[in-house]
DNA sequence: CGATGTGAACCTATTCACAGCG
DNA sequence: CGCTGTGAATAGGTTCACATCG
């Protein structure tokens, strides 16, 4: 991303540490901590130890403590963290205190599902517009929102600034949509289309690709299978089979 | 994940480097390279330079070369990579030469979308079963597949081994579903529910959480806003449209 | 000559281990 | 005494720069 290093920029504020530019890895985990905290709160606890919270968030406690320390955290030694306080802290840092407007482009299969996703509203976001390029879809009502044509985007953005654009179109349309989002001032994009978007500097793009996740899992499956084929334990039985492609057979053109 | 370190395991093979246990970061990028390669192939090229492929995949060329070198890559100095060969290589490493069976649990909003997702089939996966706990949904037909009850899972898994389980249920049900998947031998899970799953060692879980992605973007929005508020450039009025969406990405050009 | 493949330098992230505080 | 917060050690990843080979 940006390699801007506004070295002396922060750390100046008197009372509030403002925005202490966190490590990316930490940022990526804060939402998880937030979820875990809500869970803890609902269970009735009003403090948690780093151990407890770490478990709920699926990380180890050292990592959690270091992450929280980055935001000048509010824990009490010998006790733990004040749940409510920490929730506020993290929500503030993540910028969730203002309800951000999201424009969702592409109301196909996936777009439909996203439009109906309850987690949007419950976690600080508001779908401000559903858009599609297909005239047949325009006018359709989903979850109380009417689908509008992508050409209306400038007008919509003028009425209310869009904080985040979500692209759920086919790959072929995605770059075009991204350009239009950028044109109306959107600087954060969540892209579900399986393609690389090119955007000007200063615009953030995150990508979610289901197929990629599956392929990563597939790799590990493949790996596990090949390790099972030739284990450290010289198992009573199949000791043959040199390596992994065992079950598969030499089909496919890898060789040639 | 697994911290298994089968130190001396690989590196023995005479001809085929078999499974050279790649760095996680590399594994996560291979699917992206694969997509880029298909794109290049469709454009009619049969070789690519690291530069060209890197651009198509959205990374820099040094990273790409190092990644490919890990799988004992097949490039030609002064020329580039043989597209078809590299596709085969990566598909083999990712274990995509066998069509893996996927069981999708939870046919709600999101599950529906996933069931209809074309990228499944086109990239080496096959939905072997749609499952849900809700009797009302059982029997429904989606995309040519009939939704069956989750209780049928053992039977289904017996008919055909499930390589990957996809959980698209509400968070409250997810752990239970995961347990059932594990019980029938599934060792790879893709979890869309916003919660931490606890699984035995040897089972891989990957998580996709839309809300987390949005929150990460929100952080950066928040950050950008606060930097704009007290910038080096004191200009309160936006000077003059810094970036032009000018022509956007001239590359991409699959079409021409 | 041009592009790959790779050692080395650099940077980021995780883990350890314990000082320090409540 | 228990738990947080953090320096130090380690591991992992990225980038640079160039030797090497087709």
Image (cartoon, coloured by chain):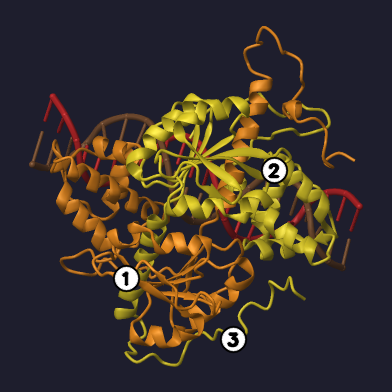
Chain colours: A orange, B yellow, C brown, D red
Can you identify the residue that label 3 sits on? B246
Question: Dot 2 surroundings within 10 Å: few (below 14), some, or many (20 or more)?
Answer: few
**Mark in the foreground, 2 or 3:** 3
Q: Nearer the viewer, residue B173 or A55?
A: B173
Residue A219 appears in the picture as rendered: yes
Q: Position of residue A40 (x, y in %)?
A: 21, 42
**Mark in the foreground, 3 or 1:** 1
Q: Position of residue A49 (x, y in %)?
A: 20, 38
Question: Dot 3 surroundings within 10 Å: few (below 14), some, or many (20 or more)?
Answer: few
Q: Position of residue A33 (x, y in %)?
A: 30, 48
Q: For residue B22, which quarter of the picture?
A: top right
Q: For residue B251, which quarter of the picture?
A: bottom right
Residue drawn at x 54%, y 48% is B141
Q: Chain for mark 1?
A: A
- On residue B70, which mark appears? 2
Q: Which numbered disc flags the more N-terminal residue, 2 or 3?
A: 2
Can you identify the residue that label 1 sits on? A100
- On residue A248, which mark appears? none
Q: Chain for mark 3?
A: B
In the picture, the quarter occupied by the C terminus of chain B is bottom right
Q: For residue B98, which quarter of the picture?
A: top right
* Callout 3: SS: loop
Q: Nearer the viewer, residue A135 or B41?
A: A135
């Amino acid at each position: 991303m940006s390699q801007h290093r506004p070295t002396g920029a922060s750390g100046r504020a008197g009372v509030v540490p403002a925005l202490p530019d966190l490590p990316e890895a930490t940022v990526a985990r804060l939402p998880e901590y937030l979820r875990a905290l809500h869970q803890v709160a609902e269970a009735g606890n009003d403090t948690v130890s780093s151990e407890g919270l770490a478990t709920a968030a699926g990380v180890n406690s050292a990592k959690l403590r270091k992450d929280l320390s980055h935001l000048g955290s509010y824990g009490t030694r010998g006790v733990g963290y004040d749940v409510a306080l920490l929730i506020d802290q993290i929500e503030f840092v993540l910028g969730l205190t203002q309800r951000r407007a999201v424009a969702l482009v592409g109301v196909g299969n996936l777009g439909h599902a996203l439009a109906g996703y309850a987690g949007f509203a419950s976690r600080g976001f508001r779908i401000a517009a559903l858009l599609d390029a297909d005239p047949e879809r325009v006018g359709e009502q989903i979850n109380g929102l009417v689908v509008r044509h992508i050409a209306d985007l400038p007008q919509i953005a003028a009425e209310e600034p869009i904080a985040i654009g979500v692209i759920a179109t086919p790959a072929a349309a995605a770059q075009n949509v991204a350009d239009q989002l950028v044109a109306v001032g959107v600087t954060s994009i969540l892209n579900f289309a399986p393609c690389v978007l090119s955007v000007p500097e200063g615009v953030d793009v995150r990508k979610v690709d289901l197929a990629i996740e599956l392929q990563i899992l597939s790799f590990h499956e493949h790996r596990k299978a090949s390790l099972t084929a030739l284990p450290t334990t010289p198992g009573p039985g199949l000791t043959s089979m040199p390596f992994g492609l065992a079950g598969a057979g030499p089909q496919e053109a890898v060789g040639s």
